[in-house]
Image: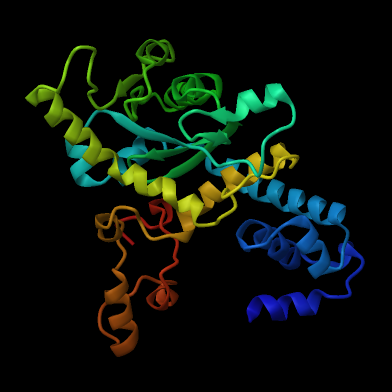
Amino acid sequence: VNTACTVETLRGRNNPRSMGYRDMFFLYFMHQNAKDGSLPTLASLFKISQGCAANLIKTCAVIEEKRRLAFGLHPTWEEHKYLCPADFLAKYPDLRVIMTDTLGPPLSGTPANPEANNATHSQYYGTNCVKGAVVLSACMWIVGWDLWTGGIPDSAYMVQSGLLAAHQKLQEADDGPPVTNMVDKGFRLETEAADAGGQTMITPSFKRKNITQLDPVEAAFSTCVGRDRAINERGVRLPGLFHFMDKITIGANMSVTNMMWKNIAWRCNFCFIPLSVNLVHEWGRKSDMDLFKAESDGSGTLIPGTQWMATTRIRPRHARYYPRDV
């Protein structure tokens, strides 16, 4: 209903310059979240040309990107220690653990160019796709990394996309320990990681040639790593809730698409409750039930400005603005 009413109020605005920022961002979010947010559909709804719609989307993407870049890539080492869950910090007290997992959004078809077809075809996914990554700090801060052609292996992706280099700059900027990359067993780049500022890798154990099963120590280690990485598996699903990456249109402006993908992943830090439930209390906030009870009968102590959280599951979740002593 809200979508229909808002679109109705915009009908007849042939001059896109008359659209305010709210209307521009409404079009921008429709393009990312609506079931049919294609340019022809948006141009028809808003009574503007497809080229104008594309320019408005790019403008909003650039505005959001500037806010994203202002936050920095990852929390600093001091922020990491302050915000990291207590159990995780006790297990890795002197390690700056960052988890990485790749994803392969499919293309809308098969590229006509043979070189593009080979570059985008992934044997793992069995289709033509692009490859991106969700990078998650141990304190649950989500970062979306650049989209590449889907045929690149995971290990090569981390090197060629500049992810290892970015982690090295992070360590050099705050004089903290080198990044410890916690990844799946498909990432095998210990040498490359060591060359990038002394980074290390934590991966599950994998079966070697002529070895039928893991020994007890390897099996226990793999189980431990898998349990610690479970939070990253859930983090990868969050950007997918926007449905923008369900299928990448062939011929789309990939520069803008890449920008919007990283914006969406960054936006997840503010749209969803914490991936780790214990952080709700560690960061000085009440649970949804506590907030609802306090809102309904006046009991409990509400944090200023959080009354609206009692009636919605969507709320800011990053700890940087919710310290323990609030």
Q: Is residue 156 left or right of residue 32?
A: left
Q: Is residue 241 left or right of residue 273?
A: right
Q: Residue furthest right?
A: 15
**Residue 111 visible at all:** yes
User: Considering the image in quadrants, where does the N terminus appear?
Assistant: bottom right
Q: Could you tell me residue 304's position as x and y percent?
A: 41, 72
Q: Residue furthest left?
A: 216
x 60%, y 60%: residue: 33
Q: Nearer the viewer, residue 21 or 110?
A: 110
Q: Could you tell me residue 51's position as x and y percent?
A: 86, 52
Whether residue 187 is situated above or below residue 104 in the rendered picture = above
**Residue 301 visible at all:** no
User: Considering the image in quadrants, where does the C terminus appear?
Assistant: bottom left
x 55%, y 25%: residue: 151
The image quadrant that residue 5 belongs to is bottom right
Q: Could you tell me residue 55's position as x and y percent?
A: 81, 50
x 17%, y 15%: residue: 211
Q: Is residue 255 left or right of residue 145?
A: right
Q: Nearer the viewer, residue 288 or 146?
A: 146
